[in-house]
Image (tube, coloured by chain):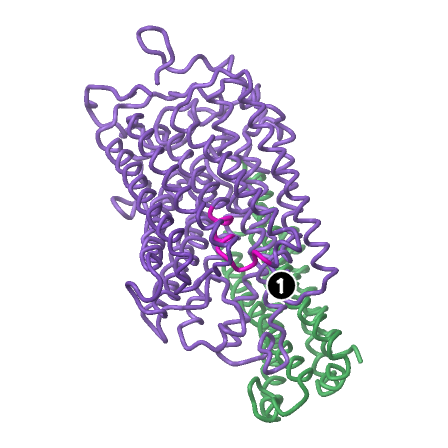
Amino acid sequence: MGGERDEKGSKIGMWLFLLSEILFFGALFVLYGTYRYKHPLDFHLASADLNRILGALHTLILITSSLTMAISITALRKRDRMISLLALAATLLLGLLFLVNKGLEWSVKFGHELYPNAPRLLSRPKGEVLFYGLYYSITGLHALHVLVGVVLISIVAFLVVKKRIDEKKMAPLENVGLYWHLVDIIWIFIFPLFYLIP
Amino acid sequence: MKALEAEKPMEGSLTAASFYGEGGRFRGLWGWILSTDHKRIGLLYLFSILLFFLTGVSLGFLMRLELLAPGPTLMKPQTYNALFTLHGVIMIFLFVIPGLPASFGNFFLPLQIGARDVAFPKLNLLSWWVYMAGACLALLSLFTGGGPIDTGWTFYVPYSLRTTVNVPLAVFGVFVLGISSVLTGINFVTTIHQERAPGMGWFRLPLFVWSLYATAWIQILVTPVVGITLLLTLVERLVGVGVFDPAKGGDPILYQHLFWIYSHPAVYIMILPAMGVISEIIPVFSRKRIFGYKAIAFSSLTIASVGSLVWGHHMFVSGQSDLASVIFSLLTFLVAVPSAVKVFNWVATLYKGSIRLEPPLLFALTFIFLFSIGGLTGLFQGALATDIHLHDTYWVVGHFHYIIFGGMGFAFFGGLHYWFPKISGRLYRKKPVFWAWVLLFVGFNTLYFPMLLLGWEGMPRRYYDYLPQFQTLHVISTLGSWILISGLIFMLGNLLYALFRGGRAEANPWGAATLEWQVPSPPPAKNFETVPHIDRGPYEFKSTGSPSRDEKGLPKG
């Protein structure tokens, strides 16, 4: 039971978990594809209502946070604990910023009475109802993953401070990094599907 | 069938030197429910699973009793609806899916590959806790909200969106159970890749391990799909996003697709480990190297992969496209090939073997017989034309129970009798097992064969009432349930007796060649004194010595 073998084992476990996450979101994308195929025009119209600037801001925030995550891991590998911690803190802040931004976007939509089951939304064509149904389901589940990521980042940051994670025992930090990148990548798919495709 | 029990009771504690003696940091009950030892976790699962199995059996018994006569007999229709739903939910999600991998898999996977434990012991314990949490949520749903669910175990929309009963909590419970299943799958795949002892190459793995490997991959890859489907159903009930609700444009057929993308492969989660158990038992009791090792190993992977692409055969009459139905039908027939490969290899292993008809083999042979009936009746439903006649009839109920109870259930009993001496360190009496088997076998066929006939004649499944012409077969079937249950009680009673009064089992009472039999019974807490080096396959019986012999030099039993 060498330490190196454990590290490799926990990496394998993490990749398997990410695989199951991809299928988790994959089912949602299948629903999106099917409904878009059935209601192309409604999806087009509903999508025009989403704020692309806000969507692009989400994307910018998450991609930057992936960068700071990668910086944190590389820094710790090079035994630079201070930089690693700073980068982790930046990732944490960006994650929180994303959630605030997301909340803002949702509350604007709620203000326009476009929340699920709202009479105003239900009076629109069925394709638009489905678009918003998927929009809330997918971005909601994604935001939940960001929230979990924020908690995980706080935990590993604490462990780095306590020197329970260092350049010899990187696996927990690297695994949280992998998770964070996955959350980022899923957003990279959500962004064009909901905001960009005309 | 001579009884093998030792006459004198054991002096001293049987279990002090084993894992039963070392609870880790905690004492008593805490030493069990907070233990990260894979053997203790395996037993936690085994007992929880047996408990849920008996609950499910009781519900089935009540259903059969209700069907003794047409019209109301015992209960109101709504109670009956709740009963068949609960019977399905409990049996499928709490017994058959975790049944073999989580109990025997946890206990024996590390032992069989020469490892100290699974790759993530803490995650393993978490899986059990999550499993129990899911079970508690599902049970809680019975007494809260609108009362017990009546949707059937499939939770089909739109009915599950409209019914007033407590669907949200039950669905969330099943979602939580799914998380437990994924965690176990991740743990097992990593364990098999990382924790094999030196020299334990892929083709020296016992076939039970191969079947767990294939099963774990299905658990990882398809469980998330049903997870999100159930989660969406929950969200639909709570806030009404509309993705499955036809009133808002949602498509119920999509729900069925996503549900069966998981729930059909789930049948292979149930049956693959069962096939793995059979592949362990048959060579040991024929004292012959297994015929076609690689064919059996790879057929597990083939069943897992092709089996993941046949879900549409549950939906032939749902209104999906005809082209889709034709493709799904073809793929369904293809899965029969790797399943038959296994059956032929088992039979070929028996051929010219030195067969000892001990209890585990008795159950294994029964598995082959009942599973073959289940498999062949399945082909009737896989064919498009006949399925229209058979769909949603008792034929399907009969077929399913032949596969799952006749297959997984009897493999579970076989595994229980095969590994009982290793787990408990005790020997059970063999003659009662034989008589229990007679009751089980006769009861099983009396219970389920009439269902095939009922379905053929047009009796729909899940009905509370029926036409008088079906009564004879229903009465026979109910009679069968009584015989089957008495067999179960007899069998479990015999094991329970052995648990307290059985003679001491030696390390390797069956003369098996796999690693778990090379350590004392019950195994020590650390499994192996030194890391074992593997230099032979799992079914090389020449090197293992003979099974225990009696004074005349004949193998015992």
A195 relative position to A10: left or right: right
Quarter of the figure that contains the N terminus of chain B = top left
Q: In which image quadrant can residue B465 be found?
A: bottom left
- Above or below, B364 against A150 in this view is above
Q: Is residue B129 magenta?
A: no
Residue at image x 65%, y 44%?
Answer: B335
Residue at image x 26%, y 44%?
Answer: B27
Q: How crowded is mark 1: few (under 14 residues within 10 Å), some or many (20 or more)?
A: some
- Chain letter of the green region: A
Badge 1 amino acid: Val
Q: Where is residue B495 in the image (x, y as percent from the top left)?
A: 29, 34
From this viewpoint, which residue is outermost toward the front? B469
Q: Mark 1 lies on which chain?
A: B
Q: Position of residue A181 (x, y in %)?
A: 66, 61
Where is mark 1, residue-wise?
B317
From this viewpoint, which residue is outermost toward the top? B552
Helix, strand or loop for the magenta stretch, by majority = helix
Q: Please tell me the colour of chain B.
A: purple
Q: Position of residue B10 (x, y in %)?
A: 21, 23
Q: Position of residue A59 (x, y in %)?
A: 71, 74
- Above or below, B426 against B191 in this view is above
A198 relative position to B288: left or right: right
In the image, which residues are magenta?
Answer: B389-401
Q: Nearer the viewer, residue B235 or A150?
A: B235
Residue at image x 56%, y 28%?
Answer: B346
- Above or below, B7 against B82 in this view is above
Quarter of the figure that contains the C terminus of chain B = top left
